[in-house]
Image (tube, coloured by chain):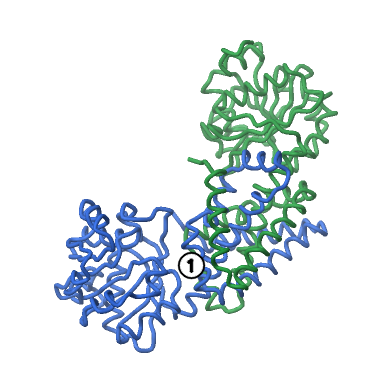
Chain colours: A blue, B green
Amino acid sequence: MSGSESPLQTLRSCLARRPVGLVGLGLIGGSIGLDLKAQGISTVALVHRARTAERARQRGLADVISTDPAVLGEAGLVVLCLPLDRLLVPTPQLLSALPRQALVSDVGSVKGPVLDAWQAACSGRFIGGHPMAGTTAAGVDAGQVGLFQGRPWAVTTTETTSSADLALLEALVGVLGARVIHCTAQNHDRAVALVSHLPVLVSAALLDTVAGERDPLIRHLAESLASSGFADTTRVGGGNPRLGALMVSHNRQALRQALRHYRDSLDALEDMVQEERWDQLYIALQQTQTLRQQVVDLP
Amino acid sequence: MSGSESPLQTLRSCLARRPVGLVGLGLIGGSIGLDLKAQGISTVALVHRARTAERARQRGLADVISTDPAVLGEAGLVVLCLPLDRLLVPTPQLLSALPRQALVSDVGSVKGPVLDAWQAACSGRFIGGHPMAGTTAAGVDAGQVGLFQGRPWAVTTTETTSSADLALLEALVGVLGARVIHCTAQNHDRAVALVSHLPVLVSAALLDTVAGERDPLIRHLAESLASSGFADTTRVGGGNPRLGALMVSHNRQALRQALRHYRDSLDALEDMVQEERWDQLYIALQQTQTLRQQVVDLP
């Protein structure tokens, strides 16, 4: 490899004609499959149900799709695109089907517990990953072309990660158009506690506040007047409850700390309201406006 | 008027060839102007600055546009489309320019204080209004066609509102494609405290939590990994700080109550995390998912 190679050239040379294996063809797995197909990289995929396999074949999500774990046999890189609960409890069938020559990665939204579950099982050839791209869609019909374009993709290397394995995974992420963000699993989990898991609870509490309004007239009126601001603020709190509970429960330590800090921030704003310090509130909202402009750079 | 009349027919007959007067041609005033023009309703508009008048004429936001309050002289209906702070402190010039024959309405985001400021000044011919349609855009270039289409528009009648005045304002709202939601000013303010003003503080506190992260590595990583979920949850907390502080300060009583209830809801979720009651968290997130599907019905 040289610095002038494109990610696609690097991926091809690292794979040495072996296919990329995908375990699961939901939103993430299906989207990876479609993008790799468009770039001419061959793919094999393992799915749970025969019906899913049939639909995934109709959609052309991978070149070979099967419910038989043996389908992964020739893969040079296997990406586990499973829901978090299934990712954290690897089945013996899946473990024995992972080919020796393959680097294994995943796309789970917490990284410490995933590393614990997979690193030993893959004899150290496991690198955790987490694409920061989501829609509300799920299932075999959710995958879409270009989902990862311009999005961050956390890659959690460890002390034992080889540079060849890292180059392979980075090439995959590059081919999908995403930006690699290097971090440890622990730091990843602290960071997403702040920007991904805390927002779920903050947003869910807002929905619960409206649901808990005791005056039915006010509650009904509030629901009638809810506009795009409320819709945006409550999107993640009104999202998939199974995924939400899984993320929270598997990242509880970092999330508890984030909740404590959130409470301090809300207390400070509430004090300004109670004590009618409007100039200070204005300055605080100027600061949050500036911060959001720095952080959020979305299409 | 009969039930079979269209809002446009009703508006024409109520106005009896008088124009609609607009005070301010920002996002809301400009959008009303463009929609009325498209429907062939004549408009006159008062703006603050000569440069704004010039640009508004270029954009065709109203038929006659002036910095001279006398421009409103023939209007049959005047809609005050001013920022909340200017709306709450009517200038003597504006008050004396409001023609006796005109019904006056507004588009401010709190209704109790607006009613206090305007009802007596308009000899009872004032009906508060609040279109629930916003974008981040502001100023003379922000107005757009169809902004109100399908959106709720709160109309706060009082005991002294005449049916003729109400019919006129409802016809205007109908012509703009919005849905009239009747409520008292007090109930409006309690409802928007829940779905509009509380979200600003909840969302700002989330931004402040990230900004306050003491470990620079984690803070930087959190900013790098922030995705669409964080962007959505923080949109209103990162919005216009002047508008945010104004809304909060002028609706502080209802907001304080909303904050108390929000704290209870967040406490309950936090307890589930602390005590690892994951099944209960799952059920709570199922309920918020259902609630959001009921409330949010946006394009």
Give the answer, above or below, for where A220 lies relative to A296: above
Residue sitting farthest toward the left: A17
Residue A149, image x, y percentages: 35, 60
Residue A82, horizontal then vertical, whole percent: 35, 67
Residue B135 in picture, x, y percent from top left: 56, 44
Residue shown at 49% from the left, 78% from the top? A187
Residue A1 appears in the figure: no
Say few, some or many: other residues with alpha carbon within 10 Å of mark 1 (under 14 / 14 to 19 / 20 or more): some
B289 to A1, vertically: above or below = above
Where A166 falls versus B172 (above or below)?
Answer: below
Q: Residue A227's quadrant in the figure?
A: top right
Q: Nearer the viewer, residue A108 or B116?
A: A108
Image height of B95 relative to B293, above or below: above
Residue shown at 39% from the left, 85% from the top: A158
Image quadrant assignment for residue A31: bottom left
Relative to the observer, which residue lies in front, A86 or A201?
A86
Q: Chain of mark 1?
A: A
Could you say whether the residue bearing mark 1 is in a helix, strand or loop? helix
**Label 1, on which residue?**
A246
For image coordinates 72% across by 16% down, the residue present is B164
Q: Residue flagged by tag 1: what amino acid is it?
A: Leu
Q: Is residue A255 visible in the rendered structure shown here?
A: yes
Q: Nearer the viewer, residue B225 or B47?
A: B225
Residue at horizontal 51%, vertical 41%? B298
- Give residue A150's quadrant in the image: bottom left
